[in-house]
Image (cartoon, rainbow, N blue to C red):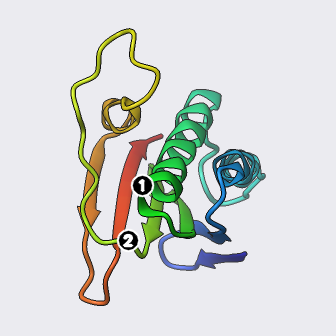
């Protein structure tokens, strides 16, 4: 884990490396909740609803990286400037796809849920390979 506080912007950041196992999604939930509920003196507190949303988003994105990317991943969290940002990077090629889901489906709705909860959602494909999925929530 690496945590930083930017002096100019008043942000807090954390980064976690997670292995390619299904329990990584549960670990991402715990890490996200702990990071967002940590007291900070110069950054606005994150409300319970936003903590719950960010925790769900981190879990969904990590689960997708592990399940579909078949690689470990890097979870990055940032809070400050009125936003919570959740980023998940994996080394697998290909962009994630949102697919239409049916009410009786047991899976496949994760990205649709993430998009519905966020103010901004994007996918970056760096020249070095892999992809970074970023979700930004307003606080």
Residue at 45% over, 70% down: 90
Residue at 37% over, 71% down: 92
**From what the image shows, is residue 121 above or below residue 10?**
above
Residue at 44% over, 28% down: 107
Residue at numbered disc 1: 68
Picture coordinates of residue 82, whole percent (x, y): 44, 49
Estimate how packed mark 2 is, as few (under 14), some (14 to 19) or many (20 or more) residues with alpha carbons within 10 Å. Answer: some
Callout 2: SS: loop
Picture coordinates of residue 119, whole percent (x, y): 30, 41
Picture coordinates of residue 87, whole percent (x, y): 45, 61
Estimate how packed mark 1 is, as few (under 14), some (14 to 19) or many (20 or more) residues with alpha carbons within 10 Å. Answer: few
Query: Is there a contact, CB below 8 Å, between mark 1 and mark 2?
Result: yes
State which tag comes first along the sequence, 1 or 2: 1
**From what the image shows, is residue 40 above or below residue 26?**
below
- The circle on residue 92 is 2
Label 1 vs label 2: CA separation? 8 Å
**Quarter location, residue 55:** top right
């Amino acid at each position: 884990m690496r945590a930083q506080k930017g002096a100019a912007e008043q942000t807090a950041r954390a980064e976690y490396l997670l292995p390619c196992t299904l329990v990584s999604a549960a670990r991402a939930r715990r890490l996200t909740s702990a990071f967002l509920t940590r007291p900070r003196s110069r950054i606005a507190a994150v409300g319970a609803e936003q903590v719950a949303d960010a925790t769900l988003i981190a879990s969904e994105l990590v689960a997708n990286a592990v399940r579909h990317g078949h690689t470990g991943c890097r979870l990055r969290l940032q809070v400050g400037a009125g936003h919570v940002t959740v980023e998940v990077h994996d080394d697998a090629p290909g962009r994630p796809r949102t697919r239409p889901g049916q009410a009786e489906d047991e899976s496949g709705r994760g990205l649709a849920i993430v998009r519905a909860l966020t103010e901004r959602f994007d996918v970056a494909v760096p020249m070095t390979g892999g992809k970074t999925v970023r979700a930004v929530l307003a606080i």
